[in-house]
Amino acid sequence: MSLRVFAPPGSSPHPGQALTLDDAESRYLRKVRRARDGATIELLDGDGGLWSATVTTGDGRRTTVEVGAPIAVLAPPRRLTLLLGLPDPAATIQALAHATEIGAERIILVRCARSQGRPPSQDRIDRVLRASLRQCGRPSPPTILGPMGLAEALELSGDAAGYLCSTALRGETEREAEASTAAASLLVGPEGGLTPEEVDAALGRGLSPLSLGPWILRTETAALVGLSRLLFSAAPSA
């Protein structure tokens, strides 16, 4: 796994530049990952860019790196929006991490009839997204919207090809994810699933059932599997 840290906000990295990391990034790099002087790392600039860099001097409170060349970042083959029916906070955090790592462009938190509890705090969400970006090397986070009602979320999903996952629709005709569309949205319900009324509302907006296999999945697992299906159905054939 590559070592990745965030550049100081507003630093606009360029080759040959010496950047001093903030306390949190210095501590992560030196104390958590135990990087030494001379280590090659990757630098997330927070503005969609990824750079090679070399650790030069410093310690767990203040570390300086030298910026190298930019690293090419591949865009996902499809722009994905996840409409996440809010599960409990722990499951929400897992779903946000999975969706970030797989490349979802937007995540809309949806208050469904069977949603439980409050969403995680913004601070906790930000920490999880930051950790996910470090993990996968994605240079910018997804847009997080909501919480909001289902009708508003469906409206925001726009005209992208839409799909929903619901055990209530097992046995119904399930449309294969279309490989030709540049964008797609996925609606996943909370624990207990979507109510019949919510399923009808989604179908009325043109969403189609998407199969996730024969078993009942946790919300965070369903989100990952569904997004994977939509993402890789858009990939060119080998």
Image (tube, helix red, strand yellow):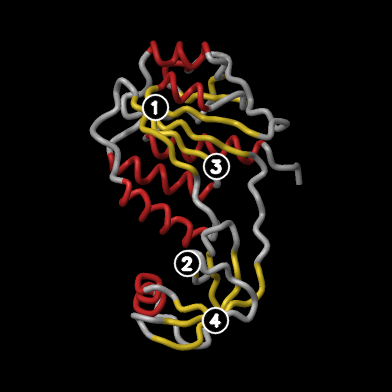
Is residue 193 depicted above or below 221 in this figure?
above
Is residue 111 depicted above or below 74 in this figure?
above
Disc 1/disc 2 C-alpha distance (Å): 33 Å
For disc 4, the marked residue is: 18
Coordinates of residue 133 in the picture (x, y in percent): 48, 57
| Most foreground residue, 198 or 46 | 46
Q: Mark 1, mark 2: which one is toward the viewer?
A: 2
Q: Secondary structure at mark 2?
A: strand
Coordinates of residue 215 in the picture (x, y in percent): 42, 29
Q: Secondary structure at mark 3?
A: loop
Lower sequence index among marks 1 and 2: 2
Is residue 141 depicted above or below 206 in this figure?
below
Disc 1/disc 3 C-alpha distance (Å): 19 Å
Amino acid type of the residue that numbered disc 4 sits on in the rendered structure: Ala
Lower sequence index among marks 2 and 4: 2
For disc 1, the marked residue is: 189
Disc 1/disc 4 C-alpha distance (Å): 47 Å
For disc 2, the marked residue is: 6
